[in-house]
Amino acid sequence: MAGVRKLARAVRQQGLHRLVLALILFCLLSMAYLAYHVSAGPKIKEAPPLPLGDCVAAAPVSGSQRAPLFLPSQVSQRRQSVKTVDTARTEPVVLLFVESIYSQLGQEIVAILESSRFRYHTEIAPAKGDMPPLAWRGRGRYVLIIYENLLKYVNLDSWNRQLLDKYCQDYGVGIIGFYRANENSPSSAQLRGFPLFLRSNLPLWDCRINPAAPLLYITRPSELEPGPLPADNWTTFLSNHSTYEPILLASPRPAEPPTHSVLQRALLATVMQDLGLHDGIQRVLFGGSLSFWLHKLLFVDAVGYLTGRRLSLPLDRFLLVDVDDIFVGKEGTRMKVADVEALLQSQTKLRSLVPNFTFNLGFSGKFFHTGTDEEDEGDDTLLRHRQEFWWFPHMWSHMQPHLFHNVSVLAEQMRLNKQFAQEHGIPTDMGYAVAPHHSGVYPVHSQLYQAWKSVWGITVTSTEEYPHLRPARFRRGFIHNGIQVLPRQTCGLFTHTIFYKDYPGGPQELDKSIRGGELFLTVLLNPVSIFMTHLSNYGNDRLGLYTFESLVKFVQCWTHLRLQTLPPIRLAEKYFRIFPDERDPLWQNPCHDKRHKDIWSKEKTCDRLPKFLVIGPQKTGSTALHAFLSLHPAITASFSSPVTFEEVQFFSGPNYLRGIDWYMDFFPVPSNVSTDFLFEKSANYFDTEVVPKRAAALLPRAKIITILINPADRAYSWYQHQRAHQDPVALNYTFHQVISAGPSSPAALLTLHRRCLQPGYYSTHVEHWLQCYQPNQLLIVDGLQLRSNPAQVMDNVQKFLGVVPFNYTQALMFDESKGFWCQRLDAGRSRCLGKSKGRKYPDMSPESRAFLSEHYREQNVELLRLLKRLGQPLPTWLRDELHNSSWS
């Protein structure tokens, strides 16, 4: 019995243990299950963040706390003494002296100048040595001088310092300089040659702007930026000379957070304006870099003031906020009824600050009612208030247009979206559309432009891809096939940025962008800004509303900018009135940008672009060179044009606006990309000013061949060419009358005069090409040698191109009847150029040759210097011409 009881007790204990283990296991599984659903399930929605607060006003300094910075009478007297900036005798170009091409401050200065579309020239600041040429024939080359390091200006040797100061005084040119302290900088010193003292390496607190500063234009002076300034190496300026006016002031940073008012602490100037009363030169001095956003704002004002507003944008800023992907988005990221109501409230609030502000909604109808029940109600609420917004179409199924190779299929997708809009009362007459992922807008997919125009009547679109996504400051507009393409800006909000606390890098990064950072600078430096946002940015934490309400408040607190919104068509009209030079595009090579290649049709290939160009000039033998090159088995010329024959003339005229698809249709797909060489010859490329830039944008790795003969002979040959084509001007005027025509001559005569003489300015045109291509990409062929010994010239051309050698000695023969070299055929026969080539005409008169020899003398001397610099041999005609000119 005792044994039985023991056994029963053991069984009960074992069962108890199993029960405990089962309970523990159950608890663990329950915790795991709960943890999974908490992490994977929908997040508990927190209250959306509130927009940034109102402006922090800096109360006027008064009473016994502190005396005003300057008495009103003093300010008035000094302003009357300031010499008005007159920069009319200077080019609108900034001369920027940098420490090195890699210096951060130099790059920040360049970024602002480029964003503002201001021209500039960069030089490494010379410690010793020559100053770059500052004037030419009584006109200043530069409207403003900027020194990245103020000490490089202050410590110039006496000769260069006098030279620069004299230039600034004579031409009314101002100077901007930056003093950046380091650990070796003295704590206090006097700036050499100036009644100005410096205190360096100071931590500063609570900055404010002096409302009496004359340079203020964009900057609104009545604000206080509380708290510590970034970094601890600030430099402040102190002077009792009347020429100096402080602009930005701050207090020394206290050891502990201050308990007393900023008005009770000393104010130190970290940006100082020199009114020019000391030495006749106006300057603006910064006691730090541009890392502080207020310095950037004041730098923009300083550039405008010192250039007499020649380098300054108007105060008007035009904003358009696009909300892409309406009805698109996965469940949990879309707008609900409350979000739509908040969108309407925010729009009303923004309209009180930005006239005509309206959210612009882009829709894809296929995804209507594809969210949760709450989100579908949000879709319905949007449609009930559809007249409160502007609307524009995406694609029906949100597919990328470049994937559609048939324009009819693409148009059908658009018709489905248009039918959806019409059924739901969405306006369809805005004339604006945006392609998903910017596909087909740039690089251009011609089918998209055709379908847009036929289905929607689109006249305006926008993209962030032209000419490239980054740097954003280079984004520009263009017009293609009657559709105006505007630059689109990002604002830091993407489809995945839907929660404030989860913003990449932390929510402070978004606030930093708004408060003087990238988003603020986009508005500051661009008169027209189209911002891209997404549906998901207006649900969830409603970051779209937070961002733009905060941005508008901040801009109006700190600037005098006048914000307003225009509908897309009027916005495009405004943009191209401001930037008329951007109407014509600058086509880039799609294969040199991965993003562009990803949104370019797979049916297209950059292998159909030429590897080299023969650029002329006209009447130098370019047609003969074209014929000789075409004999080479590895070289293929472009297809003939029914209008311009063997020439494509893409880069030099209206054909350029047809786009690169049109251009590539002139070339076959090479059978071997590495060994086959495609080329084209257009003889007017050489002297057409826009061609080098256009060619280098599309064909940056191409090689360039030009042929030069005596420019006098070229001019005479062109005149005879025009006579042969029955040009009435050439028939009615002698050659000497044409080349010696004065400025008061008839317009038709002056046109022929220019076409005879201008292409012969060889050194000028070659320099234009060398601004876009490296010297080793350019070959200059002696036109006389091409005529007398083409086989030797072609051997040099083959080496330059790097093609497999071809025996031109056997391929060519001299035709006695024609008087030049032709292709050798069987049985001693030849194939020569047409009747118009090798035409015989009377010799040029000695009078005209003497006139042209003198006319081209300076250009020929410059060509001699250029060829020696390039290491290229001198053409025989140039040696003879310079020898004869020297002898005479």
Image: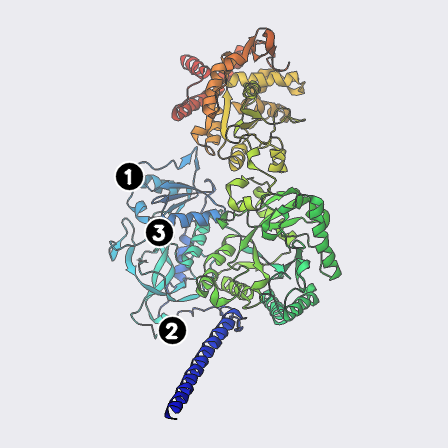
Question: Is 573 placed above or below 604 here?
Answer: below
**Residue drawn at (52%, 37%) of the image:** 697
Residue topped by disc 3 = 178
Would you say 156 lies left or right of 23 here? left
Residue 8 in sight here: yes
Label 3 Cα neighbours within 10 Å, binned few <14 / some 14-19 / many ≥20: many
Residue topped by disc 2 = 63
Find the distance from the CA under tag 1 to the CA under tag 3. Answer: 19 Å
**Residue drawn at (28%, 48%) of the image:** 193
Label 3 sits on what residue type? Phe
Residue 466 position, x and y percent, is: 55, 46
Q: Nearer the viewer, residue 425 or 885?
A: 425
Q: Quadrant of the C terminus?
A: top left
Would you say 283 lies left or right of 707 here? left
Numbered disc 1: secondary structure? loop
Mark 1 and mark 2 in contact (Cβ < 8 Å)? no
| Image quadrant where residue 259 sits | bottom left
- Choose the circle earlier in sequence order: 2 or 3: 2
Q: Nearer the viewer, residue 522 or 42?
A: 42
Label 2 sits on what residue type? Gly
Would you say 212 lies left or right of 238 here? right
Numbered disc 3: secondary structure? strand
Label 1 sits on what residue type? Lys
Q: Nearer the viewer, residue 302 or 23?
A: 23
Residue topped by disc 1 = 128
Find the distance from the CA under tag 2 to the CA under tag 1. Answer: 52 Å
